[in-house]
């Protein structure tokens, strides 16, 4: 059942879930940026890949990630500063999302 659901998801949605999962696990920002490059390579490597469609996906991905960064910044402001582990986790997640957003922006500029 999960395979069918995954197959029905748009490539953009699959990428977002993949990146969000990584960010939630606390993956380092540089690894997040590399994952964006991998995703774009996969999109461009599709049999019927059209660079214009990939650019459209990147535009949508950037919009979603920019919104996620804003949400994460807001969440960071709610973290109790006395909870060191929570502060650290929130900061790592925010940094990962920012790196991901910036990597998508760079990729859009080069396509």
Image: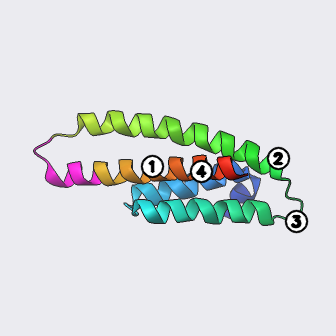
Label 4: which residue? 106
Picture coordinates of residue 38, whole percent (x, y): 63, 66
Residue 87: within the magenta? yes
The nearer-to-camera label among 4 and 3 is 4
Q: Residue at x 44, y 63 (%)?
A: 30
Q: Secondary structure at mark 2?
A: helix
Q: Is residue 18 left or right of residue 57?
A: left
The first of marks 4 and 1 along the sequence is 1
The first of marks 2 and 3 along the sequence is 3
Report the Cα–Cα distance between label 2 and label 4: 16 Å
- The image's mark for residue 50 is none
> What stretch of residues is rendered in magenta?
81-89
The nearer-to-camera label among 2 and 4 is 4
The nearer-to-camera label among 2 and 3 is 2
Report the Cα–Cα distance between label 4 and label 3: 24 Å
Label 2: which residue? 52
- The image's mark for residue 97 is 1
The nearer-to-camera label among 4 and 1 is 4
Q: Are marks 2 and 3 in contact (CB under 8 Å)?
A: no
In the image, residue 69 above or below residue 43: above
Picture coordinates of residue 69, whole percent (x, y): 44, 40
Q: Residue at x 21, y 48 (%)?
A: 87
Label 3: which residue? 47
């Amino acid at each position: 059942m999960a395979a069918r659901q995954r197959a029905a998801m748009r490539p953009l949605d699959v990428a977002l879930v993949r990146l969000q999962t990584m960010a939630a696990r606390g993956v380092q920002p540089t690894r997040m940026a590399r994952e964006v490059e991998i995703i774009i390579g996969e999109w461009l490597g599709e049999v019927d890949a059209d660079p214009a469609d990939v650019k459209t996906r990147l535009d949508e991905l950037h919009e979603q990630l920019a919104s996620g960064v804003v949400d994460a910044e807001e969440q960071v402001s709610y973290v109790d500063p006395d909870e060191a582990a929570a502060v650290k986790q929130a900061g790592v997640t925010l940094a990962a999302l920012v790196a991901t957003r910036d990597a998508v922006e760079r990729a859009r500029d080069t396509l």
